[in-house]
Image: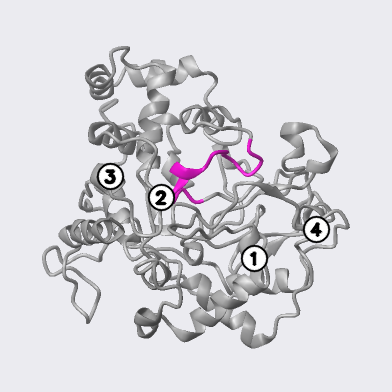
Amino acid sequence: MRIGGHLTLWLLVSAISPCFSESNGESPRTGQAEHRVGLADSRLGYESTRFVTDSKVVLRHKGERLPLDELARNPPLGLPPLPMPLNSAEIDLGRSLFFDRRLSVNETLSCAMCHIPEQGFTQNELSTPVGHLGKGVRRNVPSLYNVAFSKVLFLDGRETSLEAQIWSPLLAANEMANPSRVAVLTKLSGIESYRRQFEELYPAGLTETTLGLALAAYQRALLSADSPFDRWYYSEVERPDHASNELRYPSLAAEGFKVFRDKGCDSCHRIGPAHALFTDGAFHNTGMGYRRDQRSIRPAKVQLAPGVYVVPTVDTETEIFADDGRYEVTALKEDRWRYRTPSLRNVALTAPYMHDGSLATLEQVVAFYGAGGGEDPARDPRVRELSLSQDEQRALVEFLQSLTSVHVDALVSDARSVLIGERSASGQQ
């Protein structure tokens, strides 16, 4: 069955992936650069005036639609089945809403401006995002890859439903800043195309519930696995030594996988016999919350441009806020600075890392855990000094990089198959 799903996925991705010239990465059919992950800066070296950007503008031509409902019926190799089928029309509506800036109070922000397709459906350029009128948001943007399998949402687990969680960013004063749910529904009901689509899809039309259903449908469809690791580990699950796939998987990555298991990393980032979500879905204290708490609430200096810093002379709202993690939901003392375990799938695409985005690279993450995590004495006992050699650290990074799906670029192209909804010069579209 898994081989069949793998073949179906390959055919779907191949059908929308044009042949690009080796010389300049452009499509001979369009003459424009391909839609792909990586159209962004990591900002490594941004502290220097010699920094040169690699960013490119978001592509103006449309991408190519992927039948995401079919992908959901045959999940990529390495993922479990979805608990429910997805409706293509509902996905299409949710995709349009996801890219529509009119969902924010001043019509400048969309969901996709924090969850950027070209940046792994997160943000590579900022440790923590910027919301309404430049207000800071205190936590790193979680990637939306495979969010369909998350039983709890947000890093503190305050929501358990994709349909219900949409209202948190829509109403947060430092995110999309809408004054109420009624205000959001009133605005959308004034857009004829949305009103018609909701009436065609749902007997109740546009409501709080159906808006959540549509946005959740698109997010659930962002399935991404079938990585080099999956093809090595799951293509022949009856062969535990994976001998037949040995030549197709880097030996250094295989060594890193052994380190990953030997050091107990899989106790939180779980791997099953037939599929792997690379998370236990639970909450853990790695010491990072304590470490962040020791930082000043107001930074001594603020960076404005490559190599350009200023010292604020007035109180300014920054990305640094008090953050007690899971404790803010449960009020249990033992939950202070516990955060939900993220999946490691596509982790090489979703820098920066940790709940506050304070670690810029996978090498830094591996070094952090190798040294025993943060200094909080209440941290999880599994977070301990691992005594990793430099070779073991390199192998671990190679393994983590092998968890990148082969079809992430197809999801980017699919995402860019819709026009960005925004107020036009002649009024609402």
| Disc 3: which residue | 73
How far apart are labels 4 and 3 at the CA level? 43 Å
Q: First in sequence, mark 4 or 3: give its number.
A: 3
Q: Residue at x 22, y 51 (%)?
A: 62
- What is the crowding at mark 3: few (fewer than 14 residues within 10 Å), some, or many (at least 20)? some
Separation (CA) of disc 3 from disc 1 = 31 Å
Type of secondary structure dominating the magenta stretch? loop
In the image as oriented, which residue stretches furthest toward the left? 29
Question: Distance between the Cα atoms at labels 4 and 2?
Answer: 36 Å
Q: CA distance from mark 3 to mark 2?
A: 11 Å
Residue 364: x and y in percent read 65, 72
Q: Residue 213 vs residue 48: left or right? A: left
Q: Quadrant of residue 235?
A: bottom left
Marks 4 and 2, the one that precedes in the sequence: 2
Of label 1 and label 4, which has the lower sequence position? 1
- Magenta span of residues: 143-157
Q: Is residue 47 above or below residue 379?
A: below
Q: Is label 4 in a helix, a strand or a loop? A: helix
Disc 2: which residue: 80
> Which residue lies under the disc numbered 1?
265
Query: Which quarter of the image is occupied by the C terminus?
Result: top left
Q: Are marks 4 and 2 in contact (CB under 8 Å)?
A: no
Is residue 293 located in the magenta-colored stretch of the structure?
A: no
Task: Note whether residue 50 is visible.
Answer: no
